[in-house]
Amino acid sequence: MMNGYISVSNLEKEYVTASREIVHALTEINFEIAEGEFISVVGPSGCGKSTLLKILGGLLAKTSGTCTLKNTPIDGPRNDVGIVFQDPVLLLWRNVLQNTMLPAEILGLDAKKTLPRAHDLIKLVGLDGFEDKYPHELSGGMRQRNAIIRALIHDPNVLLMDEPFGALDAMTREQMNLELQRIWLESKKTVFFITHSIPEAVFLGDRVIVMTPRPGRISEIITVDIPRPRSLSTMGDEMFVELTQRIRNLLYVEGSLD
Ligand SMILES: Nc1ncnc2c1ncn2[C@@H]1O[C@H](COP(=O)(O)OP(=O)(O)OP(=O)(O)O)[C@@H](O)[C@H]1O
Ligand SMILES: [Mg+2]
């Protein structure tokens, strides 16, 4: 039975390299995501997290299995999905406002409607006053915030995020975690969030998908039953510590924590 908002069933992905080698990236992937749910994904480097995200985003073809969003097969990019990539690919010749507006322009949305939304989003992530600044004039955290609101401009129901905070310093990262939680609580998007940080995965997630080394499979899906909004002090709570330890053990058992 497939009745999730997003459903993935018996998903397999094999890449064929330039030298005709086959890389089995994902195998036997099965999970469902409810509408409005925040799903974190952790797993060792190379276990297929980005591959899975690209398949969910319709950017990459699967080898076999089924992936559906709202009961329709995912077979190409779609308007109701926003993606934040592992690197904050902003266009260097566009300022904050212009980068934010990019997907709206590509989708041909009415600027009269999307421009006010762009300004709201810029304010939401504290980039007001920087609308006309170019990527090289921004800090790493600001660039990342710009990439996040760009993924939100067309108001997608689903947000796919690939290690969006990986390049940030610890303090900025904590601020971004709080900010993302706030955005999510306000907008109730369905989020698929990849991270290398176990505490970050637990802090943000309703559930955490823990993956094994290549070929990536799901080792366990852990439910995070901690009330929201969560604060940074939540990270000291007994349940938080217990959950992060459990995930760490799973990754160590798989012999894969780098
Ligand atoms: N285009 C490609 N052609 C061949 N192999 C690929 C391709 N893209 C990824 N792979 C391989 O597939 C596996 C999964 O890659 P993927 O990028 O999905 O891992 P990941 O879990 O996102 O890793 P990381 O945590 O380092 O970002 C890796 O072994 C990688 O080398
Ligand atoms: Mg990756």
Image: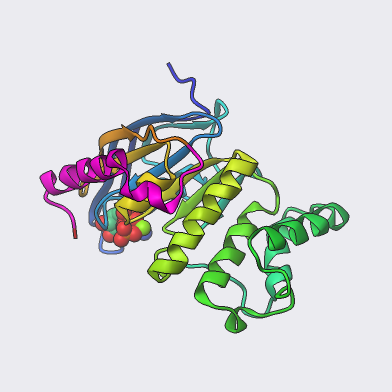
The quarter of the picture where residue 163 lies is: bottom left
Q: Is residue 190 left or right of residue 207?
A: right
Span colored in magenta: 228-257
Query: Is residue 68 at least partly visible in the picture?
Result: yes
- Disc tally is 0
Residue ID at (31%, 34%): 222
Residue ID at (46%, 44%): 230
Asked whether 125 or 190 is in front, the reply is 125
Where is residue 80 shown, x and y percent of the image?
64, 42
Q: Is residue 17 above or below residue 158?
A: below
Which quarter holds ligand 2? Answer: bottom left
Residue ID at (49%, 61%): 175
Q: Is residue 246 left or right of residue 100?
A: left
Q: Is residue 87 above or below residue 178?
A: below
Asked whether 29 or 149 is in front, the reply is 149
Query: Is residue 86 at least partly visible in the picture?
Result: no
**Quadrant of the image containing the N terminus:** top left
Q: Is residue 29 above or below residue 71?
A: below
Q: Is residue 232 left or right of residue 69?
A: left
Where is residue 247 shown, x and y percent of the image?
23, 43
Q: Is residue 78 magenta?
A: no
Where is residue 91 shown, x and y percent of the image?
62, 74
Q: Is residue 234 magenta?
A: yes
